[in-house]
């Protein structure tokens, strides 16, 4: 179930971005109702192929689709997503994205962009960061870690930004991007600069000692 009222203000203060964010608890439910929206309640039913999933996966799906339904509602679009495999399909003209990590869930939507990717992550423990950093970053990318930021937080942030970029570009790609296909070129206090196939992108971010969230926007 969703805990409390969802956040509607995005952390990047972007005016044309519909945003719903909250916390959820793992659940054995096959249907989730949310009644705190000013425009009325919304309900999501678990698809048959997830009815045997573990409670955490059920909670992720239901909470994510509740948030997605509400950003669609905010944009005056039909409130249900299509699906292709495990990938949500957003109705035109929406570009949208869903992410969850731990008990945090976010859905974001824009009707003015070609692509949108949002990703949230829990900061990796030091041992996990040491184990995974070569898979995620080259040595040149790892050297960009700014001194005030602990390396596990930097690695988690870079991982999240690359995931957000893949989500934003996935509809136009004919392949799955590997981490080393996306090159981190620069980090600033509020954004990461990334490159794929010679094209440059920016990932806005917010990070603290526990979590990070990244957002990539691809203009039309």
Image (cartoon, helix red, strand yellow):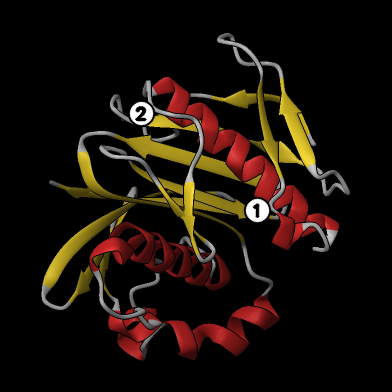
Q: Is residue 179 above or below residue 71?
A: below
Which percent across, then down, holds residue 153?
54, 64
Marks 1, 2: nearer the viewer: 2
Residue located 62% across and 62% down the image: 123
* Residue identifier under label 1: 210
Which percent across, then down, holds residue 109?
38, 37
* Left or right of residue 211, residue 3 in this image: right
Q: Is residue 171 above or below residue 29?
A: below
Residue located 49% across and 30% down the image: 79
* Left or right of residue 135, residue 53 in this image: right
Which structural element holds mark 2?
loop
How many neighbours does mark 1 have within 10 angstroms: few (below 14), some (14-19), or many (20 or more)? few
Residue 13 badge: 2
Q: CA distance from mark 1 to mark 2?
A: 21 Å
Return the residue nearer the eye: 169 or 48: 48
Residue located 35% across and 28% down the image: 13
């Amino acid at each position: 179930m969703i805990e409390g009222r969802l956040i509607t203000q995005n952390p990047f203060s972007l005016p044309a971005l519909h945003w719903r964010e909250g916390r959820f608890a793992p659940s054995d439910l096959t249907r989730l109702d949310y009644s705190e929206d000013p425009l009325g309640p919304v309900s999501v039913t678990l698809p048959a192929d997830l009815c045997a999933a573990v409670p955490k996966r059920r909670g992720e799906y239901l909470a994510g689709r509740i948030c997605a339904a509400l950003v669609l509602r905010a944009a005056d679009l039909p409130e249900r997503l299509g699906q292709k495999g495990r990938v949500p399909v957003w109705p035109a003209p929406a570009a949208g994205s869903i992410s969850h990590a731990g008990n945090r869930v976010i859905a974001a939507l824009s009707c003015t962009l070609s692509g949108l990717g949002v990703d949230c992550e829990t900061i990796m423990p030091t041992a996990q960061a040491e184990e995974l950093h070569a898979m995620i970053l080259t040595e040149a990318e790892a050297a960009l870690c700014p001194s005030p930021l602990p390396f596990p937080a930097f690695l988690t942030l870079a991982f999240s930004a690359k995931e957000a970029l893949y989500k934003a570009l996935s509809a136009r790609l004919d392949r799955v991007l590997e981490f080393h296909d996306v090159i981190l070129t620069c980090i600033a206090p509020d954004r990461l600069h990334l490159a794929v196939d010679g094209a440059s992108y920016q990932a806005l971010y917010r990070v603290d000692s526990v979590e990070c969230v990244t957002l990539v926007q691809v203009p039309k």
